[in-house]
Amino acid sequence: MSTSIFDIGAPGRGAAAQRPAPGDVSDLPPEALRRKPPRLPEVSELQTVRHYTNLSRRNFSIDNQFYPLGSCTMKYNPRGAHRIASLPGFAGRHPLAELAASQGFLACLHELQEVLKAATGMAAVSAAPMAGAQGEFAGIAMIRAYHDARGDTERREIIVPDAAHGTNPASAVMCGYVAREVPVGADGDVDFEALKAAVGEQTAGIMLTNPSTCGVFERRIADIADVVHDAGGLLYYDGANLNAVLGTARPGDMGFDVLHVNLHKTFATPHGGGGPGAGPVGANERLAPYLPTPMAAKEGDTYRWVEPADAPDSIGRLSAFAGNAGILLRALAYARMLGRDGMRRVGEFATLNANYLMERLRQQGFELAYPERRASHEFVITFRQEAKEFGISAMDIAKRLLDHGIHAPTTYFPLLVPECFLIEPTETETKEELDAFVTALTQVLGEVRTDPERVKTAPHNLPSARLDDVKAARDLRLVHEPD
Amino acid sequence: MSTSIFDIGAPGRGAAAQRPAPGDVSDLPPEALRRKPPRLPEVSELQTVRHYTNLSRRNFSIDNQFYPLGSCTMKYNPRGAHRIASLPGFAGRHPLAELAASQGFLACLHELQEVLKAATGMAAVSAAPMAGAQGEFAGIAMIRAYHDARGDTERREIIVPDAAHGTNPASAVMCGYVAREVPVGADGDVDFEALKAAVGEQTAGIMLTNPSTCGVFERRIADIADVVHDAGGLLYYDGANLNAVLGTARPGDMGFDVLHVNLHKTFATPHGGGGPGAGPVGANERLAPYLPTPMAAKEGDTYRWVEPADAPDSIGRLSAFAGNAGILLRALAYARMLGRDGMRRVGEFATLNANYLMERLRQQGFELAYPERRASHEFVITFRQEAKEFGISAMDIAKRLLDHGIHAPTTYFPLLVPECFLIEPTETETKEELDAFVTALTQVLGEVRTDPERVKTAPHNLPSARLDDVKAARDLRLVHEPD
Amino acid sequence: MPFIPHTDQDVATMLDAIGAPAIDDLFDEIPASLRCGPLDVPPGESEMEVTAALTQRARRDEPGPCFLGAGAYDHHIPAAVWDICSRGEYMTAYTPYQAEASQGTLQLIHEFQTMMAALTGMEVANASVYDGASALAESVLMAVRANRRSRRRGVAGAGRETATIRVVVAGAVHPHYVETARNIVQGQGIRLEATGFDASGTVDLARFETLLAEPPAAVIVQQPNCLGLLEPVNEVVAAAHAAGALVIAVANPISLALLAPPGDWHESGADIVCGDGQPLGIPLFSGGPYFGYICTRREFVRQLPGRIVGLTEDTGGQPGYALTLQAREQHIRRGKATSNICTNQGLLVTAATVYMSLLGAAGLNAIASRCHATTRKLVEALTSIDGVQQRFTGPFFHECVLDVGRDAEGVAEQTAAAGITGGLPLGRWYPELANCLLVCATEKRSEADIAAYREVLCRILIHAERPAIGSASEGSR
Amino acid sequence: MPFIPHTDQDVATMLDAIGAPAIDDLFDEIPASLRCGPLDVPPGESEMEVTAALTQRARRDEPGPCFLGAGAYDHHIPAAVWDICSRGEYMTAYTPYQAEASQGTLQLIHEFQTMMAALTGMEVANASVYDGASALAESVLMAVRANRRSRRRGVAGAGRETATIRVVVAGAVHPHYVETARNIVQGQGIRLEATGFDASGTVDLARFETLLAEPPAAVIVQQPNCLGLLEPVNEVVAAAHAAGALVIAVANPISLALLAPPGDWHESGADIVCGDGQPLGIPLFSGGPYFGYICTRREFVRQLPGRIVGLTEDTGGQPGYALTLQAREQHIRRGKATSNICTNQGLLVTAATVYMSLLGAAGLNAIASRCHATTRKLVEALTSIDGVQQRFTGPFFHECVLDVGRDAEGVAEQTAAAGITGGLPLGRWYPELANCLLVCATEKRSEADIAAYREVLCRILIHAERPAIGSASEGSR
Ligand SMILES: Cc1ncc(COP(=O)(O)O)c(C=O)c1O
Ligand SMILES: Cc1ncc(COP(=O)(O)O)c(C=O)c1O
């Protein structure tokens, strides 16, 4: 670790150019006032800049290296979109500004809604949710509202594949449902027979990611849709993997009723070390009335907010204002730069890169989890052999890959494949970068055989050696302690 | 070295979002057109961003570490000043825009001229010169114009101390003068007797840095001024060290007739890996008519440019437009944040830091070049002892210091002190940072005695080991060669 | 092909390696009937064109002086804040799951946790949830989990498990926060019951007593409340704790440099403190991204949603940071997680951390006190206009309710037309306050701004009877 | 204390270590008579206050569509360019003297040198001088040194050393460049003699011949020239070389992606190519900082002023970069240096390098051709107004001289009042062109911009007789 910001200060030091002259507070009741100042850093402006500049350099990032993190779509985040979202008119606009002073922003929001409708094949879109998980929550709440509105109140279950992302069951439970898991078969598709058995009148809906979290396209999606719809259930599309099929296939055409799109994945808004993102939800005609508010509407040449009065069946608001507006602007800027052909190419080249990389790794002797399948924009490999033979885990290999200046793929997801990597190169990486990845991973694999200890104790070239998670959880040190 | 940008491209690759649709050029005569496209990189936007982001990390900088480079005043560069200079109204303004669309900028330029007059004690200021050296050129050209205007055309020499910065003699020669050196004495002041002997009717003027490049205040400056003035010569003040006396002493009061200020030093505008800077010139009443144009003038509530017609004696323009406007804006923003008290404190604390650091080093056994003197904002130490005893050069020690994550002080300047460091901590560094420097340098000194080889072969922890300057000059490889 | 680096040669080589004749063949597992034609979106544009088009839109919304708060505040943001946040290393990194490759973000979050705990007077903090409103929702869920457990332990009373769990909203809590929390928690059988505010604009204590009669799982109180006023938080905490309810405080972090931290309220202190971090260096951004923060006592840390960073050691015994208590989270615990949150608001936490470092306690206190004093000046200036008066007289922080004597919606529209963002017409939230504007002045508002607002408001109110169409005075502006 | 981190405790400890009672004592070597009182500048302001004050000024100058070029061009700048340049590692580093701690800047400059050499058709480039005008001045000095030497070697003629050295300016070279060069070189006895331009707006060949009669040290020619027109550069080079003069080309780097590079002119090519790098990703910045570039043949590299980076090796045999040929420079050679330049325009070189990488040859060519085509559209649109006509008919790149039939100063003022930067009134440069505007349209100018300009110009010219004060049509805008 670097010295903490708390350890480089001195009492009374501060960034004086940032301090306004204090105001008079003598009219406030003394008992309402703070007695002791909070322990915050006491550092100069240069110290702050230097500290956080240097800290930043202890991160991997897309701007620094290849980052093939499966399910996360770590592609290039255009700087132009960042600049647009930061324009004074957008960045300085108060969320509750009067309509007359909001027409520019509302035009953008409305345009984004239209783009997402076109890209997903949905009838209506609300961009209110602030990430994928909140989109899921919104979608499942909409499903519940739909059933409730029909007096169909006994449906208690949401079906999720066992390979699903953790947010899926968590979101279902948050909406008051039981999450019922169905298994994924050896071919990576949901076990159709098991699914049929699981569906019934207790089924409120199903959540599917397609292409799935196993990196393959769910081939019987139309049949699944029929089964669920026939039982009175609805289909939720987890759009985390939309990047794979953008411009090639649309969830709306697959039979989904409601979905979210992770703009921070498919629409290239930066992940920011954890966020922010945005998870607009789209719905077909049936579910559109339940979309969360606020949304943007267009009337003639002017734009307005869709207020609760206009959407009496809406599941309502999910945030203090209108969601992560700045992220929506970034996504719109990106979408406009791509345009019709660009969007299709995103899916095409993401798929090309994944299949190329998968093929190259197969040739190098890596074990694919679904060797008979095409990769979508990502694919799964497993190190169960290495685990057995050399006592090496996927995590060990991931850590060693870091030493090569490459971010590790997603590890241990999907949970059902033992010792796995989920690898997603994205369309913005070059063939050379993919080839370098193959070389590095092959080198690590060689090392697993010749010097497993080196792999088990990786990383060796980073600011920290392997960090002790167990100690972190056992011996909780969650704030900086003064010496 | 990192792989060159020329080696990561592929024919036909490019950043498509940056390309406008080509226009029709069929009306241009074919013989005027280029036949073969230039060999430029063919890379994607992500490749460019990644390449130059990673390259940047192979630099030391103020934002990353202590940078006690003597004579260079590497202090904190306020980000707020950078933002102000980048405002659309300034950054988007065309230099030849109509006056009505230039009032905001001209108000700033005029205000900066006033601030610099106040800070230097001069009668008038032109901010046209684009760096210190161009300021010197301007000042010496003004001296020449002054003499010429009086028909005093036989003065052929400009006197410079032998410790002077290289730009001083170079600027004098560029103006057609002979640069005549006078020695600096053992106490760091100019040898007054030698100076008196050198001054005569051939003397057009003298260039002095005060505090000088030896890191001390020229104590007999008033006498020097008298001697030179009495001989009909003029005094030029090289403002590179103004930071040391800002708010404490003014060159105008010392008898200087003309000067420049390096805004990129005293006024905290960033050095940018080599530039840009700005070198406004100030002059007393006598030389004011000769200041370079353009300048800003105020009439009532409106501002205008000082055109050649208003300044018939001006040495004229030195750039296509009006100098490095963006740097002038940064300096103004900084000056306003400092204000009256802040400016004085700059000089005071720069001096405090230098004297503290000098004292600490003295106590650690380092040899000071001028042990009897106060440090100005910088001071000189010499490793002549170590050079003799261990065959270690100041450069070796500088390189080893880099291994400690500290930028080396200026080496071998002033030229007259053997194996020297010119150390300038600046006022924006903390005591802790200075103490860490003392620790590191002491450690290196210890190593000189115990393991000189380690020092001679430094650096050891940087992207490159010691680079071969001789090979660089002998075997000129000035452009990237395709493999 | 924007952002796609492939040359024709690359494509050919890659397809060849795959053994597919064309890219289209890679989609052969998608049933043909599900393939779509060209999307109904316009052709692509260059960065230059998109920038020009969206800049034009942004210009339309460029604001004048802003006197509107209501949950989002126009503070000065030091330039260093976003210069640092925009570094690719922060902006384009993922969640710091690979700790060794993420020490930058991890240490920063740990420092953030320390700062937030200090500000709120709590012991632990998480690494953000979406925004203040969702932070309140998550805090309610958390309190219910925490209190259920407490009740099982017999600490807090009868322990009767009812079908609906009640949470009491004490006083004037931001309506959007309450609405959001309600929408998010209702699926789990949690009901929010509100005391409303009395004539003083703060918690209706009589109604509060009544609602505590049957002990709720938790009580929510906002300080300063959404009308800018100071709630009697000590009384609220005392009564809530007496009733065995946990206390959730909603607090503006800037105010905490000046006002008593929730951890110090009454003797026992609040149990959970949440709110929106926007005031800490985040632009208004048209509503987001901001970030929600949640702080609590150490005993409740396992109920805290969101990521948490802990200090640990590496195999060499060197200190380093890692995400911890991940077993609370959806990627491990799935349906039983403390929350479904995954992507959070990391970059905004980065901004807030840099901001708090630059300002320090003294700087934040200066800002808070200046906001208060400036708002007082604003109120003085505006209430010197005939017919404008303060609606509530209790002490306020940096927002105040002004009765303008006529429908405030129209007034806000007219101030906007004059280039001033004049405040929130409170009829949108409380019909009984239809003549009221909620106004706010941060440290950014100058005396000239206030004077300009006063002049505009004067004009609007004086021309009230005759709608201002081409009146003489208009011409001379 | 803005930017000064010292606490009172620090100061006390430090003074104690020094053994000085007060900071003031550290100045005891400065004669008391030379100490000054408080400076006559206002008290300090916070970043917030300064930002507010200067933003207000900047707003006043915020430009509408810009049709003005004349040496500074309003191109689109990809956002990535300044996001990268603003990284502290580039922006706050010094000149890369410590090579091992500066590999980032050094490699970048080496890549820049390669790109500039490729664009100009030369073999080497330096790491910048101040701007285009000072680059011309330095090129003149360089050519004089280079040619003197050549003449000593007997290559270029009689070798007569005269008191004044002549350099010929062929055709329409930017007057500010010529003025700057003249001011800078005259101290060394160098005289610039200009051919002027003929009715075609390009070099007066007859006069050129005359001036070559006595061979000058060098000939300067600008392509495209400062009126936007293409000079007969092949003829100029042929004649100049025949007379033993070196050829200095002044070139807009964007144009070089489309036009023949100076290295290819005639058979022999220009000897020195210089110009301003502003079009390569640098904002208009009210005039600077831009950067001047100079490229030349390898044989003249020792006469080239400014820093140069070379590829070398480290002690481990690994390739790495370092400043080279420093013996040319003032810090080594002092009075005998090739130039007095020290601080250059490094950060702008960084911008240009990123810009050229993003655009590549195809991108730059697209921009150049688009500029040309857009300017043609502009010229068509404006000359369709009665009384507006093209002044010169030869081929132009992206600037064109339009005769508006009346004093162009007034026209430019009026277009500015209408929010359009309409071009340069050429009377400022050439009295005989007082009715002319030099207009320019880069790739950023849309059809709507052009239409708007046309409308404004129409209005101005039609209202020419009766100065537009409150006319009917004005009211309806
Ligand atoms: C498959 C899948 N579903 C859902 C999510 C949740 O989205 P978010 O992180 O935006 O909340 C993710 C994110 O990682 C995901 O990969
Ligand atoms: C003492 C001194 N004089 C003059 C200069 C030249 O100034 P500039 O680099 O701005 O041209 C410098 C710069 O390093 C200097 O230190």
Image (spheres, coloured by chain):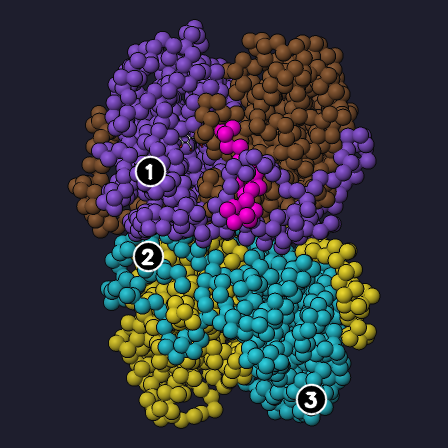
Chain colours: A purple, B cyan, C brown, D yellow
| Residue sitting nearer the eye, C258 or C434 | C258
In the rendered structure, are the residues bearing label 3 and label 2 in contact, judged by CB atoms less than 8 Å apart? no
**Number of residue marks:** 3
Of pointers 3 and 2, the one earlier in the residue sequence: 2
**Nearest to viewer (mark 3 / mark 1):** 1
Residue at left offset 37%, top offset 76%: B476
Residue at left offset 33%, top offset 51%: A450
In the rendering, which numbered label is found on residue B195? 3
Q: Does mark 2 fall on the same chain as mark 1? A: no
Q: Could you tell me which secondary element the residue under label 2 belongs to?
A: loop
- How far is mark 3 from mark 2, CA to CA? 59 Å
- How far is mark 3 from mark 1, CA to CA? 86 Å
* Quarter of the figure that contains the C terminus of chain B: bottom left
For badge 3, the amino acid type reads: Leu
Q: In the figure, residue D303 lies in which quadrant?
A: bottom left
Q: In the picture shown, does residue C168 fall above or below C98?
A: above
Q: In the figure, residue D26 lies in which quadrant?
A: bottom right
Is A125 left, or right, of B345 in this rendering?
left
**Nearest to viewer (mark 3 / mark 2):** 2
For badge 2, the amino acid type reads: Ile
| Residue sitting nearer the eye, B246 or C118 | C118
Q: In the picture shown, does residue C206 fall above or below B44?
A: above
Mark 3, residues whose alpha carbon is within 10 Å: few (<14), some, or many (≥20)?
many
In the image, residue A267 lies at what x, y percent?
Answer: 39, 37
In the rendering, which numbered label is found on residue D90? none
In the image, residue C392 lies at what x, y percent?
Answer: 75, 23
* Disc 1: which residue: A388
The span shown in magenta is C308-329
* Disc 2: which residue: B8
**Nearest to viewer (mark 1 / mark 2):** 1
